Image (cartoon, rainbow, N blue to C red):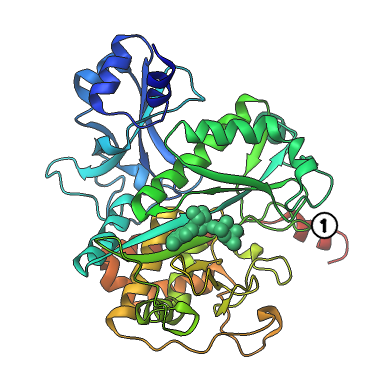
């Protein structure tokens, strides 16, 4: 095979025909068909490639509890969509063949993401994360617009493997670096064995990587990828997280995307850059004659994000742990306000005055589900445009110390309450979908509420 042909083949994406050829030549023997669960993880099966080509490429099945479990795979009672009562039947997994790709870091393996359909009627399951996002993308498209997004991901690198970390009870872990490595080249050179494998591996899996860098904490890294349409970006986000874990694991190391893994270390963010474009490719956020180059559409969109900032927080911070990240002075925001190129703001304007002018939502942690987070942001922004919401003045200066600025909800309990009461999200996502996620949020809260933490025991065992 010529080098050029090989390079094209290695570019990542596969058509069904290309997969068939790769299976025939013995290059690919395994196809992972994966759906996205409520936590944004890949869940599915590994197919012998011949069987995938034979039938599974059309559809396969999985237990419907995969869209009703928590992080631990507990069978949570009380969901309308599924239960012991209804027998936890199947959903249909429908491979979205436009997502078919090579996975270079797994030998002989391809991956396809699946939409979740009703087992009998073949309608999309409304609370499945891909369906939730597709619904908002369709609303936007009906308005003649398309969203481009880029989600950045921060994570910690540890010297231990996942198995070592587990055996140690996740205590006494050793971050890769002994010091804050923000933008450091020398420290990140020491991490290149891992980071280069991630960059090149993802690039070969059709995830165009822009760069990786050291982040503002010991052992913390960030990966930035090229912006694209919202659904493709959410797919890539899910693949990046899974891929970085697999690559680290293969090298006997662990990476963690937990929003806050240690009280003394900064948290892991997932900033989401957003811009709207016309269907024929014009930048709708840009108006060269307007202040900061921000068009009216952009101002309304941003006003919608701010107006509904509390309603959408759950989808940016879906776990108990997510709220531990919102600490002043750590680059994680505490205030839902907007500001120009200001990293203390929850919503930061980047590239003001240029065609690339965009809003970066800095609220979300690396534990968010990208489909749900992007859908919630779009729903809030669309509401801003539809209602021509007026944009408040930008905050100037340090948002952490601004006492009258809008707070981001500080607990899961508070965020769940605003989610439950959000008329905007109920209209945008559907009543049943919001009820489903409110139930998930309440379960997460109640699971935590019954814990007795190390901190409590240490504090009170002798002295209470
Ligand atoms: P910063 O480091 O200041 O956050 P970068 O220049 O590194 O900003 O860009 C961050 C992300 O924004 C990148 O993933 C990039 O692809 C994305 N991006 C650039 N232009 C746009 C746009 N118009 N819409 C959405 N995302 C964009």
Q: Nearer the viewer, residue 240 or 321?
A: 240
Q: Is residue 269 above or below residue 161?
A: below
Horizontal side, residue 140 vs residue 154: left or right:
left
Q: Nearer the viewer, residue 216 or 44?
A: 216
Image quadrant for the C terminus? bottom right
Q: Which residue is painted at 31% across and 44% down in the image?
A: 84
Q: Is residue 461 above or below residue 4?
A: below
Q: Which residue is painted at 20% across and 18% down in the image?
A: 54
Rendered location of residue 135, percent (x, y): 25, 60
Q: Is residue 175 visible?
A: no
* Farthest residue, direction right: 463
Image-quadrant location for residue 308: bottom left
Horizontal side, residue 268 vs residue 134: left or right:
right
Image-quadrant location for residue 113: top left
Image-quadrant location for residue 387: bottom left
Rendered location of residue 147, percent (x, y): 34, 62
Horizontal side, residue 460 vs residue 445: left or right:
right
Q: Is residue 298 visible?
A: yes
Count the numbered circles shown: 1
Horizontal side, residue 14 vs residue 257: left or right:
left
Image quadrant for the N terminus? top left
Judge the density around disc 1: few (<14), some (14-19), many (≥20) Cα neighbours within 10 Å.
few
* Farthest residue, direction left: 121
Residue marked by disc 1: 458
Q: In what element is the residue under mark 1?
A: helix
Q: Which residue is painted at 24% across and 50% down in the image?
A: 125
Rendered location of residue 312, percent (x, y): 44, 70
Rendered location of residue 239, percent (x, y): 46, 40
Q: Which residue is painted at 40% across and 67% down in the image?
A: 377
Q: Nearer the viewer, residue 445 or 200?
A: 200
Q: Is residue 338 above or below residue 29?
A: below
């Amino acid at each position: 095979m010529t080098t050029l042909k090989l390079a094209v083949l290695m570019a990542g994406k596969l058509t069904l025909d290309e997969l068939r050829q790769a299976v025939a030549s013995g290059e690919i023997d395994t196809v992972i068909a994966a759906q996205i669960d409520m936590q944004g993880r890949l869940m599915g099966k590994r197919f012998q490639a011949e069987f995938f080509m034979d039938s599974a490429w059309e559809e396969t099945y999985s237990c419907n509890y995969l869209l009703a479990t928590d992080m631990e795979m507990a069978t949570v009672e009380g969901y309308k969509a599924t239960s012991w009562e209804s027998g936890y039947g199947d959903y249909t997994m429908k491979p979205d063949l436009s997502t078919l790709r090579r996975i270079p870091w797994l030998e002989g393996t391809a991956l396809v993401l699946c939409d979740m359909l009703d087992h009998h009627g073949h309608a999309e399951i409304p609370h499945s994360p891909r369906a939730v996002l597709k619904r908002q993308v369709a609303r936007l498209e009906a308005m003649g617009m398309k969203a481009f997004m880029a989600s950045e991901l921060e994570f910690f690198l540890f010297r231990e493997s996942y198995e070592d970390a587990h055996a140690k009870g996740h205590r006494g872990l050793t971050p890769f670096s002994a010091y804050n490595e923000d933008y450091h080249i020398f420290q990140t050179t020491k991490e290149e064995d891992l980071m280069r494998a991630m960059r090149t591996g993802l690039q070969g899996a059709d995830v165009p990587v822009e760069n990786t860098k050291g982040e503002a904490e010991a052992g913390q890294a960030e990966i930035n990828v090229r912006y694209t349409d919202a659904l493709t970006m959410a797919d890539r986000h899910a693949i990046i997280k899974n891929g970085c874990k697999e690559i680290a694991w293969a090298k006997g190391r662990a990476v963690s995307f937990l929003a806050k893994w240690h009280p003394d270390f900064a948290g892991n963010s997932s900033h989401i850059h957003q811009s709207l474009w016309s269907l024929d490719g014009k930048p709708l956020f840009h108006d060269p004659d307007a202040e900061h180059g921000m068009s009216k559409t952009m101002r309304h969109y941003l006003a919608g994000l701010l107006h509904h900032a509390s309603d959408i927080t759950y989808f940016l911070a879906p776990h108990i742990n997510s709220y531990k990240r919102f600490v002043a002075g750590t680059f994680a925001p505490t205030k839902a306000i907007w500001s120009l190129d200001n990293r203390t703001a929850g919503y930061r304007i980047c590239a003001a005055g240029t065609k690339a002018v965009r809003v970066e939502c800095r609220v979300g942690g690396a534990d968010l589900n990208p489909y749900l987070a992007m859908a919630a942001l779009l729903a809030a922004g669309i509401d801003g445009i539809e209602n021509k919401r007026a944009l408040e003045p930008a905050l100037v200066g340090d948002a952490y110390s601004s006492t009258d600025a809008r707070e981001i909800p500080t607990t899961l309990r508070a965020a769940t309450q605003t989610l439950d009461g959000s008329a905007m999200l109920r209209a945008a996502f559907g009543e049943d979908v919001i009820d489903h996620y409110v139930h998930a949020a309440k379960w997460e809260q109640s699971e935590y509420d019954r814990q007795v933490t190390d901190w409590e025991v240490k504090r009170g065992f002798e002295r209470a």
